[in-house]
Structure formats: C-alpha cells, structure tokens
Amino acid sequence: MEEKGEKSILDIIAEHGANERLDAILFRDPEFQKLECKIGKEMGAFSRLGLSKKERRTVDMLLSANAESSAYYSAAAYLQGFKDCASLLKETGVVK
C-alpha cells in the first residue's frame, strides 16, 4: 500500500477486492452475520449504560480508531497475499 502519490495497479486491484468483492462475499457468510448480530446486541447494551455525552464520544473515538486500524491491517494483509501469490506464480513458471 502506497502512502503518497499515485496508486499502483496492484493497490487498485487489492482495494477493489478488499472493499467490493469481499463485502459481497461476507454479507452472505453466516459466521459474519452472527458477528454483526453480536455487534448489534452489544450496541444495545452500550446504549443502556447511561453514559454522558463526553463518555460516549470517548468510547466512540476509541472504537473508531480501532476499526480504522483493523481495516488498514486487513487491506495490507490482502495486498500482501496478492503479492505473495504473484511471486509464487512467477517462481513456479506459471507467469513470466
């Protein structure tokens, strides 16, 4: 994943795969649906805690930072897997 400048074709392909294709696959996955349901239940429990606006904002900021970090990590892992696959194809002579 490039930090600045233009995106490489590999970054564009990986971004498409990680964002669009993977979303379509995950939203049909029963395990992913269970996890989403669990998040919904925890959100309900969180809402019932009666936290102040400042406390809710602090928790929101923490969760947002964690989600952003996880998304970046997942995209980087996807891209690295794509690069590893390309290297393997080259090493085995499937692709020149």
Image (cartoon, rainbow, N blue to C red):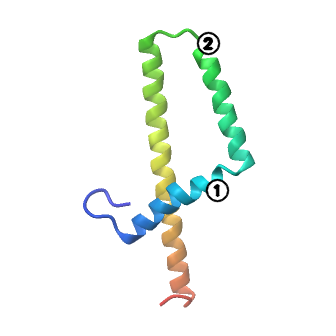
Q: Position of residue 34 (x, y in %)?
A: 72, 39
Measuring 71% from the left and 51% from the top, which residue is drawn there?
A: 29
Residue 84, above or below 30: below
Closer-to-camera residue (30/83): 30
Q: Which residue is mark 2?
A: 48
The residue at 60%/24% (across/down) is: 43
The residue that mark 1 highlights is 25
State the count of labels: 2
In the displayed structure, 35 sits above or below 86; it is above
Rendered location of residue 79, percent (x, y): 48, 63
Q: Amino acid at mark 2?
A: Arg
Residue that appears at 31% across and 56% down:
3
Callout 2 crowding tier (Cα within 10 Å): few <14, some 14–19, many ≥20: few
| Rendered position, 4 above or below 65 | below
User: Could you say where residue 76 lies in the image, as x and y percent from the top left?
Assistant: 46, 57
Q: Amino acid at mark 1?
A: Ile
In terms of sequence position, does the residue under pointer 2 or pointer 1 come before the other? 1
**Residue in the image at 69% along x and 51% along y:** 28
Residue at disc 2, secondary structure: loop
Q: Is residue 35 left or right of residue 49?
A: right
Measure the alpha-carbon separation of dots 2 and 1.
Answer: 33 Å
| Quadrant (top left/top right/bottom left/bottom right) for the N terminus | bottom left
Q: In the picture provided, is 35 more to the left or to the right than 46?
A: right
Whether 50 is drawn above or below 8: the answer is above
